[in-house]
């Protein structure tokens, strides 16, 4: 056993090991002598961590919402907070009333999910996931003793085929985009299938002009979704965009100002703005460019396992959302006879 003190806490902490498990206990004192007295009296075999009292008897849903939003704005994207967390709480409070958090029972939550499911199945699934995460945080904050949504099954959302566009439709979107950097970002997404976060974090050091590839690399500031590096071939249509002979290794390929990279929310909104000006399907969004890359490959007969590697999917099941295109191609082939 020993005492330690970190920059994160003003209190001394006691560290001990029982049955091979390392455990830390706060001494609840900033005084070194008092901390050593705590150490002298401490019995690791008989120690029981005190259970914090539940504080949720009086906190209202609206009050908890405000606290959770304050927490979320520091950790999640602005679009996720505005499109998921805020509306989820708004609809819940409208449905159940601004009642104490602890009074939310299973029947009320079940009816809320059913009510939302009847109007929009995907919306019900989104609100379920969002509120479940929020209530888990309420448990950690001692507002609830357990998470009520863990006892309710997640609503099932019927699987739908991904929406994609062709080159002509991409060009329509590019025509409605005035900013050249944005045009380039949209083009790279269409011809590489890279995620928006990957494109905006792409650096000159990722570009290998000899092998004509982009190597998506993990760093302190960025990791790929799979946490693994991935190789993406450089399509001729994007070579002049990503290959910058005079750039430094640490330079982002896409900079909004000097070394400041573009914001994901900004790029997504600008894509949607350009899309609406074309009057194409309004369900298309930036991620549809990634779907387009995969779908266009499958339509041209590329094996799903090759597409899986190019997209960086860990499981072929994820890539199989494009399998309906393979079946369509087979049907079209038969019709040619």
Image: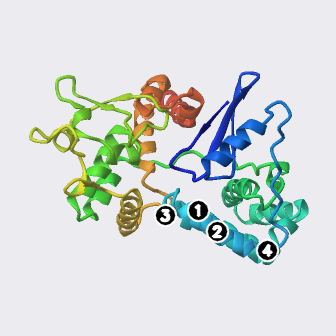
Tell me the element at label 3. helix
Judging from the image, the colouring scheme is rainbow
Residue 144 vertical position relative to residue 321 in the rendered view, above or below: below
State the separation of the CA atoms marked 2 and 4. Answer: 20 Å
> Circle 3 is placed at which residue position?
78
> Circle 4 is placed at which residue position?
95
Along the line of sight, the residue nearer the viewer: 335 or 176: 176
Residue at image x 85%, y 49%? 151
Q: Which mark is residue 71?
A: 1
**2 or 4: mark nearer the eye:** 2
Q: Position of residue 238 (x, y in %)?
A: 23, 41
Q: Position of residue 99 (x, y in %)?
A: 82, 75
> Circle 2 is placed at which residue position?
67
Residue at image x 64%, y 68%? 67
Tell me the element at label 2. helix
Along the line of sight, the residue nearer the viewer: 138 or 279: 138
Q: Position of residue 140 (x, y in %)?
A: 72, 53
Task: Please say whether residue 159 is visible from this viewpoint.
Answer: no
Q: Nearer the N terminus, badge 2 or badge 4?
A: 2
State the separation of the CA atoms marked 3 and 1. Answer: 12 Å
Farthest residue toward the front? Answer: 33
State the separation of the CA atoms marked 3 and 4. Answer: 25 Å
User: Which quarter of the rendering shows the N terminus?
Assistant: top right
State the separation of the CA atoms marked 1 and 2. Answer: 6 Å
The answer to the question of whether label 3 and label 4 lie on touching residues, with beta carbons closer than 8 A, is no
């Amino acid at each position: 056993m020993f005492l330690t003190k970190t920059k994160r806490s003003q209190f001394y902490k006691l560290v001990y090991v029982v049955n091979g498990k390392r455990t830390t206990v706060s001494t609840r004192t900033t005084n070194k002598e008092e901390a050593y007295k705590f150490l002298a009296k401490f019995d690791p075999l008989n120690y029981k961590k005190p259970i914090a009292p539940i504080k949720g008897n009086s906190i209202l849903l609206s009050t908890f919402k405000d606290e959770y939003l304050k927490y979320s704005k520091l950790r999640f994207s602005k679009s996720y907070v505005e499109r998921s967390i805020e509306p989820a709480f708004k609809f819940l409070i409208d449905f159940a009333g601004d009642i104490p958090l602890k009074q939310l029972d299973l029947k009320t939550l079940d009816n809320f999910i059913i009510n939302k499911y009847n109007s929009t199945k995907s919306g019900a699934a989104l609100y379920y996931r969002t509120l479940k995460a929020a209530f888990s945080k309420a448990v950690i904050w001692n507002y609830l003793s357990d998470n009520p949504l863990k006892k309710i099954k997640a609503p099932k959302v019927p699987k739908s085929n991904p929406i994609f566009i062709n080159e002509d439709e991409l060009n329509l979107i590019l025509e409605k985009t005035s900013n050249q950097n944005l045009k380039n970002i949209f083009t790279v997404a269409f011809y590489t299938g890279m995620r928006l976060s990957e494109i905006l974090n792409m650096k000159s050091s990722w570009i290998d002009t000899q092998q004509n590839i982009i190597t998506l690399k993990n760093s302190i500031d960025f990791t790929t979704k799979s946490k693994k590096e991935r190789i993406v071939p450089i399509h001729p249509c994007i070579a002049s965009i990503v290959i910058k002979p005079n750039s430094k290794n640490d330079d982002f390929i896409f900079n909004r100002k000097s070394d400041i990279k573009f914001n994901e929310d900004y790029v997504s909104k600008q894509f949607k703005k350009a899309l609406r000006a074309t009057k194409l399907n309004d369900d298309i969004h930036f991620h549809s460019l990634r779907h387009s890359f995969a779908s266009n490959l499958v339509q041209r007969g590329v094996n799903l396992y090759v597409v899986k590697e190019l997209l960086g999917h860990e499981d072929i099941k994820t890539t199989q959302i494009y399998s309906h295109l393979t079946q369509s191609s087979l049907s079209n082939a038969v019709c040619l006879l």
